[in-house]
Amino acid sequence: MFVKNPEYFMAIVKERSISKAAERLYLSQPYLSQYLAKLESNLGAVLLDRSHSPLKLTPAGEVFHAYLERQSYLDRQLVSDLRDLQNEKRPVLHIGVSPWRGSTLLPDVLPLFTKQYSDVQVVLHEAPVPELGDLAAGSVTDFCIMHIPGDLTELTYELVMREHIFLLAHRDHPLVRGLTSTYDDPIPFPDLRQLERERIVMLPPDWRLSKLLHNTFSVHNVEPQNILVTTNNTTAINLVAENMGFAFLQESGISRTPYLDRLACFTIGEPPLTCPMAVVYKKNGFLSPAARTFIDLIKEYYSRFDRPANL
């Protein structure tokens, strides 16, 4: 469907005001009002609820706005793809991932992807988890592998799995000595209150996993007195391996650590605590066949770690 001057409608939606949009577009307000009225007449639907101030999209307006966003993305993608073909450039797939997640996932998945798409250049955008959503929203990445972000205004996601969160301890630590709880066959940790005066290595408090754990502490009336904050899960594992504290980590990333023989791995609570992992990308964005294949490989790889949701 051809829409004349779609940027006019997009400006009205962004400004939530015809007068402000007209000012931004260097148009007169009456002209922009006539444009909107003609557009609604051609579509046979009211797009904006004018009884609200600021203006509010109607259900039909939501659908039309999503259509224009997707069309704009497809237009840009077409121009980019044609330019790449003309310049004989290799197709590029941009993936956002945290450094730790990338180090534990990509060695298994990238070889499988390369067998199917040997001509596609994979570009990694490694960033802390809280920054990944911005990369996806800004179309810097085709998709990001991350926890489900709190703000989904410009994003959508596909759930990949819900994985166990393990409590890691050195096998010789007095609190766990005599307990047999391995990565392959974990048991629930007896009582989280035993950790109150122990060193606990955790990610920053505004990260999704830490928020989940602090909520768990609150439920179990646990008030940790000695928290060591790191942005690197590898640091957490290495400290636990040297018997320098406890740490909470996702199950899927622990299997590649070289210190499994030193670690005791416990689930938390009953049913065991889980955390969702998702593939996140721009709402109404375009996923190339290569991106879809990579996502499917991620889901297949992580299916072994998928657990029931917490009740």
Image: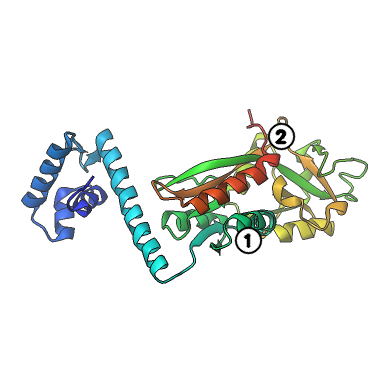
Q: Nearer the viewer, residue 292 or 197?
A: 292
Is residue 196 in view from this perspective?
no
Mark 2 vs mark 1, CA separation in Å? 26 Å
Crowding at mark 2 (Cα within 10 Å: few <14, some 14-19, many 20+)? many
Res 99 seen here: yes
Q: Residue 217 is drawn in which quadrant?
A: top right
What is the secondary structure assignment of the residue under circle 2?
loop
Instruction: Please name the residue that numbered disc 2 is placed on.
Output: 272
Type of amino acid under label 2: Pro
Residue 71 in percent (x, y) is at: 31, 50
Q: From the viewer's perspective, tell me whether residue 291 is left or right of residue 79.
A: right
Measured along the vertical axis of the image, is residue 21 above or below residue 92?
A: above
Nearer-N-terminus badge (2/1)? 1
Q: What residue is shown at x 67% (from left), y 46% (from top)?
A: 301
Q: Mark 1 belongs to which amino acid?
A: Pro
According to the picture, the residue beneath numbered tag 1 turns out to be 99
Q: Kindly indicate the quadrant of the structure image that contains residue 308.
A: top right
Closest to the observer: 34 or 199?
Answer: 34
- What color scheme is it? rainbow
- Which residue is situated farthest in the right direction here? 178
Residue extending farthest to the bottom is: 87
Q: Residues within 10 Å of mark 1 (few under 14, many from 20)?
A: some
Label 2 vs label 1, nearer the camera:
1
Residue 103, how many percent across, how many down? 67, 59
The image quadrant of residue 20 is bottom left
